[in-house]
Image (cartoon, grey):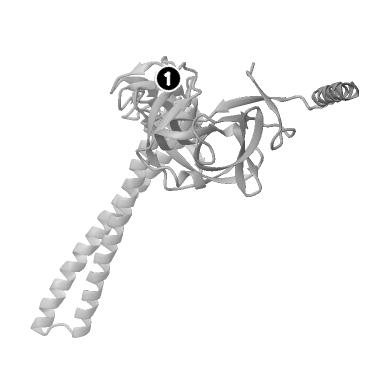
C-alpha cells in the first residue's frame, strides 16, 4: 500500500514538474520564412538615367537682324527644309547711319586722292623712263658722262617704287570704301541676305524654343532645338568602378518610367571619358556615361525623361537561390538560419552571384530548405521559432 502511494506521488510530482517546465519554457518566436529553390537569377548594376534624342539639332541665326516671332510650338513636327521663321533687317538708327555715311564719304575721298597720286606717280615714272633711255643713248655716243647715266638710272628706279606704293595705297583705299559701303547697307536694310529664312535640316519634332519673341539677334544666336524622335536613347552615368564591368551588347531593363511594364534595352557604348560629379551627400565621384538603345520601342517616353536603368552583367536560368534578406554576415562568412522541426539552426552559406533581391547559393543550403528572412537580434542558434505568413 505504501509502495503504491509512493508511485502515485512520484507520478503527480512528475506531472507538476512537466507542467511547470512547459509553463515557463520560452514561447516560439514568430518569424517570416522563405524556401530555397532553383530558378532564374540576374546580376545587375542599377542607376538612374534619362532619355535623350540621338540626333539633336540647334538652329541658329544665319545672319544678324530682327528675328520674327515663331508661330510653332514645342512638340510640333517639322519636315526637311521647312521654314521656321525669317530674320529681317535690323531697325535703322539715324545717328549710326549718319556715322556710317560719313565714313563712306571719307573713304571715297581718300580713294579719289589715292587715284590722283597714282596718276601723278605714273607720269613721273614715264618721264623717268624716257630720261633714262635718252641718257643711255648719249652715253653710248660719248656725249654724256657715266655719272649722269647712274643718276638717271636711280631716278627711274625711285619713280617705279613710288608708283608701286601709290597703287598699294589706292588699293587699300578701295577696300575701305567697300567695307564702309557694306556697313552702311547692313545698317539701312540693304543686306542682300535679308530677310533670311531659318530652315530645318531634317524631319523631327521641336523640343524647345530658345527664342520665343520677336527680337534683334546676332549671327549664331540659338533659336530652336529639334530632335529626331524615332532615335531615342537612354544615358545613365555609372561609377567608374561599375562602368568597367559593363560592355557593349549587354542586355538591360528600363524600369520606373511611368508605364505598366519594363522596357528592354541594350548597351550601345560606354563613353571612354569619365567626369567628376558631386553626389547628394556632397562627395565627389568619378563617373562615366553608359548609352543604351531601346529594343522594342520607347513607348510614350520623350526627350529628357527620367528612368531607372538596370544593366544585366550576368544571368542564368537555373541556379539555387536564397532571398538576400535571409543571409547575414557572421565574422568573415555568410550565414543563414535554417528551420528544422521548429528549431532555428545557424548555417554557414557560400554565396555566388548576387541579384537585386536574391543571391546564388553555392553550398550550405539545399533545395526545399526553409530559412528565416529578416532575422531579428533575438533569433539565436537552436531557438524555437514559429513560421508566420507575412501580412
- Which of the two residues, 228 or 72, is positioned nearer the viewer here? 228
Rate crowding at label 1 as few (under 14), some (14 to 19) or many (20 or more) other CA atoms within 10 Å.
some
Q: Position of residue 378 (x, y in %)?
A: 75, 33
Q: Position of residue 103 (x, y in %)?
A: 43, 40
Q: Secondary structure at mark 1?
A: loop
Q: Is residue 281 left or right of residue 139?
A: right
Q: Residue at x 25, y 75 (%)?
A: 154
Q: Residue placed farthest to the left in the image? A: 141
Placement of the C terminus among the 4 image quadrants: top right
- Which of the two residues, 335 or 108, is positioned nearer the viewer here? 335
Placement of the N terminus among the 4 image quadrants: top right
Q: Position of residue 219 (x, y in %)?
A: 41, 34
Q: Residue placed farthest to the front in the image? A: 1
Q: Quadrant of residue 247?
A: top left
Asked if one can make out residue 144 in the rendered structure from this viewpoint, the answer is yes
Q: Quadrant of residue 162?
A: bottom left
Task: Look at mark 1 in the image and give the residue it sits on.
Answer: 68
Q: Residue at x 19, y 63 (%)?
A: 126
Q: Quadrant of residue 282?
A: top right
Can you say whether 148 is above or below 355 in the image?
A: below
Q: Residue at x 40, y 21 (%)?
A: 206
Q: Is residue 167 left or right of residue 13?
A: left
- Which of the two residues, 88 or 287, is positioned nearer the viewer here? 287
Asked if one can make out residue 105 in the rendered structure from this viewpoint, the answer is no
Q: Residue at x 73, y 25 (%)?
A: 28
Amino acid at each position: 500500500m505504501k509502495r503504491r502511494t509512493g508511485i502515485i506521488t512520484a507520478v503527480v510530482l512528475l506531472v507538476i514538474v512537466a507542467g511547470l517546465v512547459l509553463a515557463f519554457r520560452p514561447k516560439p518566436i514568430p518569424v517570416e520564412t522563405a524556401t530555397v529553390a532553383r530558378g532564374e537569377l540576374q546580376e545587375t548594376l542599377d542607376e538612374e538615367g534619362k532619355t535623350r534624342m540621338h540626333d539633336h539639332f540647334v538652329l541658329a541665326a544665319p545672319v544678324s537682324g530682327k528675328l520674327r516671332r515663331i508661330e510653332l510650338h514645342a512638340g510640333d513636327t517639322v519636315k526637311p527644309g521647312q521654314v521656321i521663321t525669317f530674320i529681317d533687317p535690323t531697325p535703322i538708327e539715324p545717328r549710326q547711319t549718319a556715322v556710317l555715311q560719313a565714313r563712306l564719304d571719307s573713304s571715297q575721298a581718300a580713294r579719289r586722292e589715292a587715284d590722283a597720286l597714282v596718276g601723278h606717280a605714273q607720269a613721273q615714272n614715264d618721264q623717268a623712263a624716257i630720261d633714262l633711255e635718252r641718257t643711255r643713248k648719249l652715253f653710248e655716243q660719248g656725249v654724256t658722262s657715266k655719272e649722269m647715266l647712274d643718276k638717271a638710272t636711280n631716278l627711274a628706279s625711285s619713280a617705279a617704287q613710288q608708283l608701286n606704293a601709290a597703287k598699294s595705297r589706292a588699293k587699300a583705299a578701295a577696300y575701305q570704301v567697300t567695307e564702309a559701303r557694306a556697313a552702311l547697307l547692313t545698317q539701312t536694310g540693304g543686306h542682300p541676305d535679308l530677310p533670311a529664312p531659318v530652315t530645318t535640316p531634317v524631319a523631327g519634332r521641336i523640343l524647345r524654343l530658345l527664342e520665343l519673341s520677336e527680337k534683334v539677334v546676332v549671327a549664331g544666336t540659338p533659336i530652336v532645338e529639334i530632335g529626331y524622335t524615332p532615335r531615342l536613347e537612354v544615358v545613365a552615368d555609372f561609377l567608374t568602378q561599375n562602368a568597367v564591368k559593363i560592355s557593349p551588347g549587354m542586355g538591360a531593363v528600363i524600369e520606373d518610367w511611368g508605364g505598366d511594364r519594363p522596357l528592354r534595352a541594350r548597351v550601345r557604348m560606354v563613353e571612354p571619358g569619365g567626369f567628376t560629379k558631386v553626389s547628394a551627400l556632397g562627395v565627389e565621384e568619378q563617373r562615366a556615361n553608359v548609352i543604351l538603345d531601346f529594343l522594342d520601342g520607347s513607348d510614350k517616353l520623350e526627350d529628357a525623361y527620367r528612368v531607372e536603368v538596370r544593366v544585366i552583367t550576368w544571368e542564368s536560368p537555373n541556379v539555387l537561390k536564397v532571398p538576400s534578406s535571409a543571409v547575414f554576415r557572421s565574422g568573415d562568412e555568410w550565414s543563414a538560419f535554417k528551420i528544422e522541426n521548429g528549431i532555428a539552426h545557424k548555417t554557414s552559406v557560400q554565396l555566388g552571384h548576387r541579384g537585386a533581391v536574391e543571391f546564388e547559393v553555392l553550398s550550405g543550403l539545399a533545395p526545399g530548405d526553409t530559412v528565416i528572412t529578416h532575422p531579428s537580434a533575438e533569433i539565436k542558434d537552436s531557438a524555437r521559432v514559429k513560421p508566420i505568413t507575412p501580412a
